[in-house]
Image (tube, grey):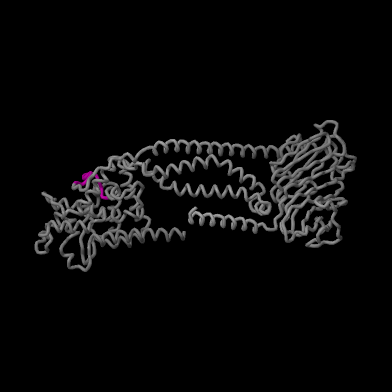
Amino acid sequence: MNSKRIKKIIIFLIVIFIICFMIYKSGENTQYMNNLDYNINLLENGDMEITETWDMYINHTNTIFRDLNLYGYDNIESISVIDLETGKELNQIDHEEYHVPTNSYYALPLQSTKFEIAWGTGMENSFGRKKYQIKYKISNVVNNYKDCQEWYWKLLEKGENAVPVQNVTGTITLPKPVEDIENLKVWGHGQVNGNIEKVSNNEVKFEVKNLSPGAMLELRTVTTEKIFNITDEEKASIEKLNSIITEETKWAEETNKTAEQTRIFLIVVLVIYVILVIRFVLKIIKYVKINKRDNDGLIKKELKYYRDIPRENDATPNEATYLYNYNKKSLSNSSVQANMVSATILDLALKKVIELNVKNENIVVKILNQNPQDLKSDEKEIFELLKDVGKNKEEFEIKELNQYAKKKYYKYSTNINNCVNYARNNLYKINLIDKREEKEYAGCEMASLKLKMLSLAYICAFIASVIFHVPILKGAIAYNFGISFQMNFIIYVLALLPLVSVAIITWKLQEKIREKIAVLTQSGMDEKIEWRALAKYMEDFSMLDEKEVPALSIWEKYLVYATAFGIAEKVIEQMKAKYPQVFIEENWDEEKMSNEYPIVNFLSNPIYATYDHFRPVTSLKANVKMAYTTSMAEIAAHSSSSGTGGGGGFSGGGGRRRRPEAGMGGR
């Protein structure tokens, strides 16, 4: 194993450690309960005996407490706390303490509406698993109506329970069996994943998985048989059964509606998942076939020099620039715009749409034709830009482009972008570039990054799904992400394995086939080679033994494309070397050159020799590039400022029972 890989593994482990440490610290004093079991005995006189069994992890916490809200209780008595590991009952103290001594507890009314049971754990500096049993008795908990008797109790108050519980179970035992089990009706409220059922004529069981902190837990039993020996003159004349059933049915319907919506959502997710897997599988089949090729299938003809202009009557400098620089992926505007725009300005001058002159080492532009009819879309964008810069002026200096770009940055940028896009789209249209293959190649370019990111993410997720089950982290994770997070997380990780696998195989194949994708069509490859050979021909012209020297009218066009390819200065020197007598100042015919050869005149007038380091083509490109940079800077700057009672699942209703009980926590 090489040192780079070892270094990456070490960094990865450090990151995992830091994440675990941060999760742990964020919920350092949070408790986590494996199981919470309720044994509820309803007595014939209407009282209730509750035994709560707590199986929990305690994390650096001295005192655990259980709060009960006092709303109309007749009495809370027979309280005890037992350490189930030792079997010993904790000693009761008669006063409140913030930190209760080890193996002691108090059970006191702290406020007019609050009764608290709290006990010492002796674990303020440690972490571990403990089991406790809390017993208490509450009087007068059953309602006696004319047509039924009701026990309606909130074991945990919404928002007050601070301890996440992995599994809540419980048993409710009636004082005697009902004669007909249909006369016993039961409901549960809170998390909808709970379940409550009648197991016999006098026993009801309930269960809730992954009870989140702050979740409510509420139970309701109703009997139409009088099994409790109680009197309640105030309620004895009230018929309550129908209103209870109506209320519970409404809550159940609302919960079922939500469950149906959830089911539909899961079906949609599953369908999308299957579609994605199938899509990746089809791509794998496609890429396996491509991988069998020897190359991209294009014939690259040998052509060192080429003197003709490809598609001379149809090609624009923008298209030539784009194809000349094209390398299987869409070019960015910043990489080609200076050459494109500069060459297009020269081409507009060649077509006598504008006039270019030099005055005092400044390039001056004059609009000759306000409404030219023979320009292509990409050329029109540059012409409209120049016309807007020189609006209400007879002529303007090219450096005014920068001032325009600063004021009208969005418009300037839009014109340039449109120019490049029109050129690109026309190359698609005339089938020189295959747009679908270009997109495929772009995907291959990203395959390596996507592969690394997905692999790393999945490995991290898999390791996390294991680490998150370490007991010392359970409480902190449940506190930060919810009690269901751990189980759901590993389910999601495993469920995603097929999709992740086919995605990795797909992107791995994309890495291998990248150079076997032919983005250019054969015609596109031929023309690109011709443009490259033309550029080479212009650069080496003076060294070639040409029987026929191209006329200056041909050089007019050559200079436009030389500017498009970024070799104009070299080509000007080649031209001067072949026509030395023309470029001597004494022989220079100013009137003829400006009328017949405007581009040659503009770019290579002998008078420039008297200027200090001034070159028209360099100045033109510099001003164009500066204006584009200015527009981008301005855009960036302005953007930044600118139920029936037969049992079953829990419902989401409830919350209105007669007497609430509060939550659990630690300190």
Q: Is residue 159 visible?
A: no
What secondary structure do most residues of the magenta stretch adopt? loop
Q: Position of residue 346 (x, y in %)?
A: 23, 54
The quarter of the rendered structure image containing the C terminus is bottom right
Disc count in the image?
Answer: 0
Q: Is residue 93 magenta?
A: no
Q: Is residue 281 above or below residue 36?
A: above
Q: Is residue 126 left or right of residue 316?
A: right
Q: Position of residue 283 (x, y in %)?
A: 44, 38
Q: Is residue 309 magenta?
A: yes
Q: Foreground: 335 or 30? A: 30
- For the point 59% across and 38% down, the residue is 266
Magenta residue span: 308-317
Q: Is residue 259 left or right of residue 314?
A: right
Q: Position of residue 408 (x, y in %)?
A: 36, 58
- For the point 58% across and 39% down, the residue is 265
Q: Foreground: 119 or 48? A: 119
In the rendered image, which quarter is residue 389 located in? bottom left
Q: Foreground: 397 or 154? A: 154
In the rendered image, which quarter is residue 342 located in? bottom left
Q: Is residue 365 above or below residue 426?
A: below
In the rendered image, which quarter is residue 126 located in? bottom right
Q: Is residue 433 left or right of residue 52?
A: left
Q: Is residue 438 above or below residue 541?
A: above
Q: Is residue 468 left or right of residue 566?
A: right
Q: Is residue 574 visible?
A: yes
